[in-house]
Image: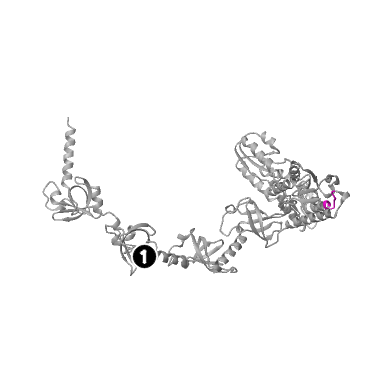
Amino acid sequence: MEISLAEYAGFCSGVKRAFNIAETSLAEVGIWYSLGPLVHNDLVINFFENKGLLKIEKLADINRFNETNEKNGIIIRSHGVSPDIINSANELGLAIKDATCPLVKRVHDIVVELDNDNYDIVIFGDANHPEVQGILGWCKNKATVIENVEGAKSHAKRKKIGLVSQTTKDEAEFYKVAQSLLPKAKELRVFNTICIATRQRQEAARKLAKEVDLMLVIGDKKSSNTTTLYNECVNTGVKTFLIQTASNIEDRWFEGVSKVGITAGASTPDWIIKEVFDRMTGYDGNQNEETTSQLANNEESFAKLEAEMAETESPSRGDIIKGTVIQVLDDEVMVDVGGKSEGIIPLRELSVNDINSCKEVVSVGDEIEVLVLKWDSDGTILLSKKKVDTNRALDKLEEDFNQGSLINGTIIDVVKGGLLVDVGVVAFLPASHVDVGYVKNLEDYKDKNFDFKIIEFNRNKRRGSQIVVSRKELVEEEKAQLKEEFWQNIEEGQTRQGKVKRIVDYGAFIDLGGYEGLLHVSELDHRRINHPSDVLAEGEDIEVYILAIDREQERVSLSRKALLKSPWENFIENNHEEDIITGTVVRIAPFGAFVELLPGVDGLIHISQLANFHVEKPEDVVSIGEEISIKIISLDLEEKKVGLSLKQVAEDVTENEVQEYLDNQE
């Protein structure tokens, strides 16, 4: 007879955690109580009762102190309890060990949030199940428990509904309940809180049931996840029996059966599974024709089971293992690492980078590699993803260092003496290796991505940076190549795009891509510029004209002025004879006054055009700095001269006033 064990069977991580907490607690001084069954399996309960764990139904049954006047304590069962019970235990002065499954705690957190946000809470589960009773306590009993799809269909309509599930329910049924609640609310929030171990057991059991002639489901009938497993197998059509121990097996079940599958609920201990397997390997499917080959097959199956169970043994410190993320909080991540264990990654051990929340890095369902750091006293494994990522990155970086390969990284922070670079791990970039020459502001490089060369690698270094990188040499090589290309292509009369690199009193140095040319202050504009910073800013992109090239001295003279229209061109483009414009008196001569019309363009008001009366001296009519309105009376394009009249403006005003007066007469 061929016997197969489902891939996932036996203790889940939550039950294993409760088991370890109970074992550890019973080794301590004092008497320990369990409020209700620790887990839903009588064999486990009996195991701990024999070790001294006392099961009670209410806190009042607990003696607070023992004969040695040591404080007694209570172990919160894996199904969890309401906060009122925890508060009461604290008020009684009891020591408390919380063995609540972390996934059940997640449901508690969700219903608290939903209650605070005024959602009508619906719990898909068994109303009398202790896990559901505990969940109800965390939302002040303001929730409706729905046990099936029919209950969802008859649920009253609400504005906002939040749906959670007992962790051991059937997932397919949960989604049907969610579907039925859709028309019942304007807003429906659905949280799939079914334990991943429950889903894995159901999927593995269904898969195995389709490959065998008979299924044995091992577990306590009071266990919700065990009965769900049983129903899943029955629904495949295969003959299925629910047993609690090997003694429940009946030989008649196996008549004509050649393949048997075995699975077990999440609260079923390993020793029971082994007892059942022992019983099965000793059973002959055809007692009248027992053969050596059948015995060999049974031995092989037993060896296979032993190997499968060995694979689920708890990992040791220093092991690198794979796991699946089953819960993500801001400060920690819970990981299912298979078998009987669960692990916690604290925020500090999740990423090589500084992060504010674990949610920035991983999501539920992600498969990750982690390093086992240590076991906590409650059975939880402390894990590190950061150390695995660091070691993997260091392996690759060491290879790059030995081969002289370039690496890519992002600058993440400015520190004393340089920059920190994310290259898979955090490397140090000295300020002197950031660029060629002195870097004025290191902040300009933050969050930028570059290629680097590793100039120092020391994996075992405990103080300072294990990896030191540089981009100075790369920048030098790049600039040398750009410089060569620049001198091959540059010609006088070209217009080039450049960036203002540095501003000095006598001009500005413009980066033309491979070479810096000088833009003298006299070539900035047609008008006089007091200082280059009046018209330019460092980092600004500008167009420049190549005035002159000295290849021997490697000098390039630039002009901005050559690309700008002259003040005279701007003036004649926008002004015409007979236009009245404004200007500022800038100089007075015996024959008239000069008026600035634009920076760089002056016009003359002849003394005869200053007023409609005889003018002895121009300063009798105008003064330097005075802003006046004047009429353009002539434009000499060749000589670039403008003739102006103040008198005609006054005459025009008088004429207009007379005309307005006449127009207003009857």
- The extreme top residue here reads 666
Q: Residue at x 87, y 50 (%)?
A: 289
Q: Nearer the viewer, residue 456 or 26?
A: 456
| Residue 142 in view here | no
- Report crowding for label 1: few under 14, some 14 to 19, many 20 or more residues within 10 A (C-alpha): some
Q: Is residue 81 left or right of residue 188?
A: right
Residue that label 1 marks: 487
Where residue 106 appears, as percent x and y from the top left, is: 66, 48
Where residue 317 appears, as percent x and y from the top left, is: 69, 62
- The extreme right residue here reads 288
Q: Nearer the viewer, residue 87 or 147?
A: 147
Looking at the rendered structure, the kind of residue marked 1 is Trp
Q: Is residue 153 left or right of residue 30?
A: left
Where residue 561 appears, as percent x and y from the top left, is: 29, 58
Looking at the rendering, in which quadrant would you find the C terminus?
top left
In the image, residue 1 above or below residue 385: above
- At mark 1, the secondary structure is helix
Q: Nearer the viewer, residue 299 or 369?
A: 299
Q: How is the image coloured?
A: one colour
Q: Is residue 649 left or right of residue 345?
A: left
Does 619 appear in magenta? no
Where residue 549 appears, as percent x and y from the top left, is: 31, 65
| Residue 521 in view here | yes
Q: Residue at x 17, y 35 (%)?
A: 661
Q: How many marks?
A: 1
Does 282 appear in magenta? yes
Residues in magenta, as a range: 279-285
